[in-house]
């Protein structure tokens, strides 16, 4: 589950000569003005621009921290505190030829979905066939609903599947969620079909066993079905990750 979080930023302050005033570190300001024993939190880390993110144990702790900062003149004058904003969802358009221009894709989207503005390209993935790419685009709520409702998008007299893209990290070496292949700590790969310690290309099993569901059953005593591969869209662990991801998006 997503843990309640507060983001703390410096306010930009200037003197009478319009010169920016020096800033104290946010953690230093908190130590001067607020006891950490007043708030229950589980983690604190530095994020961009020397801001910090404080992860609380409960939503009530988030609100308590926001209230204490707002009611403290010495903190409220120099710190902006807020909850993280939800991000836009994304779509993926499959199999677009590499010679296709951004203008052609945007024109097709506007004409066939009725959206009124260009969509931001997040990145491109290598397509299944040579010379093609899958395009991942950021879609604000209204544009997301319009683009995902058509299922297929015509571009230059060719049809391309279109659906929601989930920004979820999953390792192709051990099949666990939360990290990618390059940062995996396992030396040997796990099989995405049977869950044993060998590459899937060497698997001789006839019955699938999901390594993720099986591992959670073993660790937590759950009773998830395991008769599917680690890449199955019906996997309980996959669906839990999708639910967590969707809670961070503004639909």
Image (cartoon, rainbow, N blue to C red):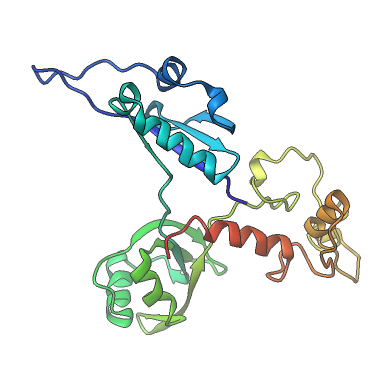
Q: Is residue 235 above or below residue 114?
A: above
Residue closest to the eye, 106 or 14 = 14
Q: Nearer the viewer, residue 200 or 114?
A: 114
Viewer-side residue, 173 vs 15: 15
Image quadrant in which you'd find residue 29: top left
Q: Residue at x 27, y 65 (%)?
A: 118
Name the residue at the bottom extreme.
157
Position of the C terminus, as image quadrant, is: bottom left
Residue 46 point in image, percent of width and height:
48, 28
Number of numbered labels in the structure image: 0
Q: Residue 35 versus residue 142: which sits nearer the camera?
A: 35
Q: Is residue 183 above or below residue 72?
A: below
Q: Position of residue 187 (x, y in %)?
A: 79, 39
Compared with residue 208, is residue 217 higher up or lower down, i.e. above or below?
A: above
Residue appearing at x 81%, y 62% in the figure:
210
Which residue does the image show at 85% across and 68% down from the upper left? 208
Q: Position of residue 180 (x, y in %)?
A: 64, 46
* Drawn side of residue 141 relative to residue 190, left or right: left
Residue found at the very far left of the displayed protein? 17
Residue 113 % position (x, y): 33, 79
Give residue 159's quadrant in the image: bottom left
Left or right: residue 117 versus residue 67 is left
């Amino acid at each position: 589950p997503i843990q309640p979080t507060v983001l703390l930023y410096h306010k930009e302050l200037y003197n009478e000569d319009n010169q920016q005033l020096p800033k104290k570190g946010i953690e230093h300001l908190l130590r001067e003005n607020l006891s950490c024993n007043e708030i229950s939190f589980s983690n604190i880390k530095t994020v961009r621009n020397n801001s910090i993110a404080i992860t609380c144990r409960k939503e009530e702790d988030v609100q308590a921290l926001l209230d204490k900062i707002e009611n403290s003149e010495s903190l409220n004058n120099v710190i902006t505190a807020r909850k993280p904003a939800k991000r836009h969802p994304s779509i993926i358009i499959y199999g677009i030829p590499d010679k296709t221009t951004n203008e052609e894709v945007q024109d097709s989207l506007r004409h066939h979905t009725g959206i009124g503005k260009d969509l931001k390209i997040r990145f491109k993935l290598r397509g299944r066939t040579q010379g093609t790419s899958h395009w991942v685009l950021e879609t604000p709520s209204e544009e997301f609903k319009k683009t995902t409702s058509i299922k297929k998008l015509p571009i230059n007299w060719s049809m391309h599947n279109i659906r929601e893209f989930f920004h979820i990290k999953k390792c192709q070496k051990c099949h666990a969620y939360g990290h990618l292949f390059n940062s995996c700590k396992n030396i040997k790969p796990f099989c995405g079909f049977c869950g044993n310690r060998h590459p899937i290309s060497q698997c001789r099993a006839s019955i699938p066993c999901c390594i993720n569901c099986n591992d959670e059953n073993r660790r937590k005593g759950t009773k998830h079905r395991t008769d599917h591969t680690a890449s199955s869209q019906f996997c309980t662990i996959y669906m839990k990750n999708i639910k967590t991801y969707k809670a961070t998006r503004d639909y």
